[in-house]
Image: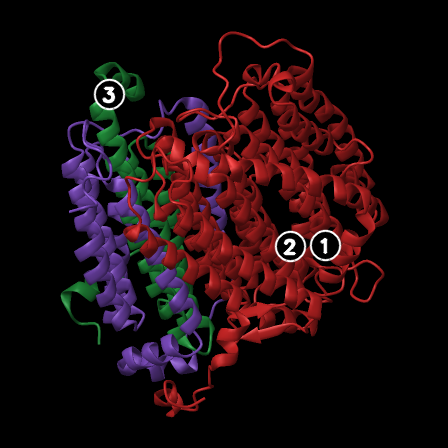
Amino acid sequence: MSTGFLPLLLQAAPAAASAGQVGLTHYLVVSAIVFGLGLLVVITRRNAIALLMGLELLLNSVGLNFVAFAKFATRDAVDGQVITIFLIVIAAAEASLALAITLNIFNNLNTVEVDEARSLKG
Amino acid sequence: MNGLFTILDAPAAPAIGWDDLGGILPVLVLLATGSLALVLDLFLKEEASPPVPAGKWPLSFVSLLGTAVAGALLCGHIGAAGKPWSGFLGAVQVDLFSDAIGLIVVLGAAFCLLGAGDALRRRGIEQGEFHALVLYAAASMVLFVQSASLVMVFLSLEALSMAVYILTAFQRDEKRAVEGGLKYFVLGGLSSGFLLLGLAFIYGATRSTNLTDIAGALAGGQPPADSSLLVAGLGLTLIGLAFKVGAFPFHAWVPDAYEGAMSVVTGFMAVAVKAASFGVLLRVAVLFGGAGASGPGSPEARGALLAGISGLAVVTMIFGNLAALAQSSAKRMLAYSAIAHTGYLLVGAVSAMEARPGGEQAAGAGLLFYLFPYALMSLGAFICLSHLGEGAEDRESIDSLRGLAERHPAHALALLVIMVSFAGIPPTAGFWGKLFIFREAIATGHWELALVGILTSIVSVYYYLRLVVAMYMLPQEGGLPAPSLEARIGGKLALAIAAIAVVLVGLFPGIFFQISAACALR
Amino acid sequence: MTFSDGAFWVFAATAVLPAAGILLSRSIVRMAFLLLVSLAGFAGLYLQLGAGFLGFTQVLVYIGGILILFLFGLMLTARFDVHVRRRVGAGVIVPGVIAGLSLLGVLVFLALESPWSTEAGAAAAAAGAGDTFQIGLKVLGPYVLPFEAVTVLLLVAMVGATYIGRAQMPGTPAEGERKE
């Protein structure tokens, strides 16, 4: 089965690969790492759009969690997918709103004196 | 029910019918009124607004009517003492508890709309969007408390949060408001992330999205598939909800968002967002950690929730009260005092977790009772700050309230009643609220929480009375313009109702406590 | 190791590595493009989990829609950064990073510690090809109220975004544009 170049290469992949088939644990670890990275982005960044990207990473990692749980742990795998579709909608709504607020701040700062803008830049 | 949904009949589709819509009628009324306000605004002439004091009165009238109808429906349901009803194939559960919290939410929306007419007109932004967003937010909050599935919990939470972010930044040409909105948005989004991950873990641990099913399985002695995952999920959910109610380590957004928003909106946030979030917090806490409800399901979950909520209660009470001492702005002081009251309400949540079904005290009676006068006091205080404002500014600093008793004795008296009640001085509503909550805490063996609560309440007397001293004993300072309040009927009405209701609840606490006990979670 | 497992590792790397890049990158535009790659990795993981409809929704809505929105936002505000915080000092970063890393540790520990089965649930196999049909039934069945709640959410976001985002040009009354 695994005679192609790519699978051969990946057989050398460390740790969990040797533990056997890819299962729920693998997905949960990926999701946990991305959640942590998203959290760190939100904590360390100052720019509003960068923060929003961190929030998008959080939402995605949760979505992966739902789909993986639904597939591996429950009787009905479609539940998780429906929930994740809702999450994508939430992400879209959040993005539009956040960008509206960001644009508004940008416009407000543009109309006031430059001093103000500089003070905000810290 | 045939016709619309027959298409679903193919693979044994369970039917959803008019009954389901009827069950969430208050929500539908609020949504419809919001959309109506949005459309109505298009037909109202702008010219009439600045010189004519009434402004776009049909907007306020229609939206207030909507809240009145929704409130009447909720009251009717409470009066009928209906059995818990579950609809939309288990997506919502309507019981007396959700009705009671919904009523407080609708009360918050009604007061906000009553005071908002003047506040918006002064700023030149009297637009249907405001009324629509308040009503949409209220509808989402009622749905939030009624949710019986994890999906409904986070969708309605997102909808209500988003409406409130926008309301915070509604003064869109005011830098402070928009920045407050952005900060609230970012921290709120982060907290939603935590809550969502928590719900995903609960889903993974219990294999179900339906809270009622989960509770049934746990109460039946069936342990969750994965206990540590359930505890982690509940912990993350608790963090997410603690953000929303503004408990101590997760309070960073509260002062900025409360200060940035218009005072009427601040009142709405302090009351409605908090009431709805506490409703869900209590439901989750009792479901997964209640003394009787969860039975032998998961003792770890109960221990973790009890420890978490008690810890939050203690630090929140201490932090909120100490931080409020240092404020020179009345609005910021009230924001920190809102954090302190979150602490007291958390004490109520802890004792609710100890209540046994069938016992003499239903779970959360104290918390429900406390929410009602707290709602009246907060709405009254924030609307008063807005009511006394001028132009785009609200009356925010404590110094600017100096000598208020001489110029506007009625307003000063109303604010005096509210402050005394906030401080919990004996014959007032606030006193009874604290008494019931602390009595419940002692009765369930959490005397240390009651002790911290009583000590911090004594501290709080200082900062509430500072405001009273400024109003009654200090001379007026500088040439602050005295706004003419003749035309501001809405704010006057709201303030009067709030103050009178606070007095009434203080005089007849028994009736209100009985209603709260009847509406508590079973 | 099967081909499918190999694909998992490729997609997982595609999802995680760009996310780390976002954390470390200095340029906001580069961050946006890294986000694109990461989201594509997630789409791959969804496909890997047998969620075909979801995977393509992810590509269409997230990568096609939301990310374009991000780029618009970036282009419109590119002249200077809109900062949420004044300055992120060590007082925030150190406890924040510690808290973040410990949470990460707990999450990974939880995932590894549980004795998960590697076999999909019984229904998962049945879903497979017909998952769009299944999703449709779910959305009009038990998820009909959540679906309606989502419409409320979108309505709120739409009303709010158009209200807040309507630019306030100096000298132009706010109502001017409404009357057009």
Task: Give the red chain's letter.
Answer: B
Tell me which corner region of the image, top left, top right, bottom left or bottom right, holds residue B384.
Answer: top right
Tell me which corner region of the image, top left, top right, bottom left or bottom right, holds residue B504.
Answer: top right
> In the rendering, what colour is chain C?
purple
Under circle 1, the secondary element is loop
Which residue in the protein does label 3 denote?
A112
Relative to C130, does residue C158 appear above or below in the rendering? above
Q: Name the kind of residue labelled 1 in the image.
A: Gly
Q: Where is residue B110 in the image (x, y as percent from the top left)?
A: 53, 49
Q: Residue B176 carries which label?
A: none
Give me the residue at 44% from left, 43% from top: B188
Residue B522 falls left or right of residue B439? left
Please report, as a chain letter, where disc 3 is located.
Answer: A
Mark 3 and mark 2, same subunit?
A: no
Task: Give the green chain's letter.
Answer: A
Which residue in the protein does label 2 denote?
B282
Which residue in the protein does label 1 denote?
B364
